[in-house]
Image (cartoon, rainbow, N blue to C red):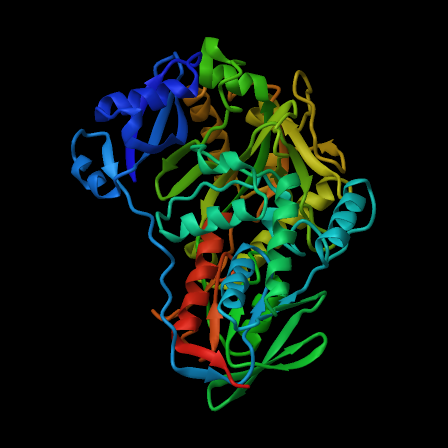
Amino acid sequence: MIFVRDIRLPLSAPQGQAVEAALRLLRLSRLQVEGADVSKISVDARHGRPRLVYTVAVTLKDKGAESAFAGSAPCVAIIRQKPLELLRGTEKLAHRPVVCGLGPAGLFAALLLARQGLRPLVLERGPRLEKRVEAVESFCKGGQLDPEGNIQFGEGGAGTFSDGKLTTRIGDDLCGFVTRTLLEHGAPADIAVRQKPHVGTDKLRDVIRSIRREIEALGGEVLFETRLTGFIRREGRLCGVQTSRGQIPCEALVLAVGHSARDTFEMLMEEGLTLTCKPFSVGVRAEHLQSAIEEGLYHEAAGHPALPRGEYQLSRHYGERCVYTFCMCPGGQVVPAASEEGGVVTNGMSYHARDGANANAAVVVSVDGRDFGQDPRRAIAFQRRLEQAAFQAGGGDYSAPAETLGSFWENRGRLELGRVQPTYARGVRPWRVGELFPEELAGLLRRGFADFDRCLPGYGAKDTVLTGVETRTSSPVRLERNESFVCRQLEGLYPCGEGAGYAGGIVSAAVDGLRVARAILEKYGEISP
């Protein structure tokens, strides 16, 4: 397939002009072409007048002639889609593999194992999606927190209640497999062409259910509301797991528990496995008017129907720390994401339409093992202290502490609402948000907002609402594995995904799940009858 990149057109131009421009550059007639269509759309708004930038994919009737176009122009490339190559091992499993966790990593690991006939057994501590949605909606409306069914735990993992972003920096061919699978299971078609694709929490739920049903149809099984509680070993090898439902024999366990499974992290350490600290970040959720963000990004073109909802990614280094924005949700809302009683946690969520009045994003500052004496228990305790402090500051009823940016800069603890109305469902209470954090981190957050305002005009608006706290940006720990994806301390255990410290986001977690499943398949050819 021939790809023609960097075709720049005004916002008013129809997509068909991009295809015609590609054919002219290749000097091809329609008679030579089997198919030509837009494969990617992005926006270049750097010079004040946004333009759409297209990549067009062209397939010739004579496939053998395509290679002649390689290098014909700087913007032309020949790309051949690589099939997912799988080598099958010769060893036999006595029992089917077990996957712990049904977030993106566990979901895709289980899917690949199921498609290859290994009939995985999936353990998910939270409920199936229908029950989980009920629990989350009840909590958002003022009900009790369910520690096992919430925005962190349950079918689909934490990404289910998010913007459903599919952007990633990992550059792995398996990313294409993830996208194709999501499309096969009902994801919006535009995720195949958008520069910054997203599914939206509403669409993502049906996709997750559909993938789980394929796993089950292929002989896999999902046990909901089932927690992993320990390991059974023989001569240094895994031979089974302890669960809240009893013992399950297995020689291959994919551990994909997500970044919030603190009790599981504790269990791993009690079992004698060594966890190490990894960097993570803490901060607040910042809400602006979506229209103000788009004015800062698109200038006079803001509101043009050809433009996507405006989104941003900002960062600034200060010595060895970084202040940056994370998980930006255009037209979204700030959601209560606690998974432990007595703690307040915030996160962001958008529906596919992204049609809410506010934009929100985490604004966070980095911390790492040096802040905690390289002790993972201290790192987890640090997250927990921030969440408990926010709970008390919010009044002890899961309301969240909040402050407008003008007040935050001066540490006045005021909620001086203007154009931006807070969306956090449990309600907010005025508080000196900076005092929730160590003084150094609060100072860096203030510097970050000031510098971001110079990068994106309007970002420092005084009526920006800051809601605390954001602590679950990524896992604070890592469980080391070798080049075969096996835990260095327990043969048969495969640490996987974000909770094990090897991913960050839906696509990278899904890809890591595929890598781990592929490693299992390369060792085991089949299950003994």
Residue 297: give x, y in percent of width and height: 46, 19
Where 59 sits versus 234, above or below? Answer: above
> Which quarter of the picture shows residue 345?
top right
Q: Is residue 97 left or right of residue 511?
A: right
Quadrant (top left/top right/bottom left/bottom right) for the N terminus: top left
Q: Residue at x 64, y 58 (%)?
A: 213
- Marks counted in the figure total 0
Q: Residue at x 65, y 21 (%)?
A: 420
Residue 8: give x, y in percent of width and height: 33, 19
Q: Residue at x 33, y 20 (%)?
A: 20
Residue 330: give x, y in percent of width and height: 57, 29
Of 86 and 441, the residue lying toward us: 86
Where 394 sits versus 155, above or below? Answer: above
**Residue that lies at the very extreme toward the bottom in this rendered image:** 235
Residue 83: give x, y in percent of width and height: 36, 55
Q: Is residue 356 left or right of residue 425?
A: left
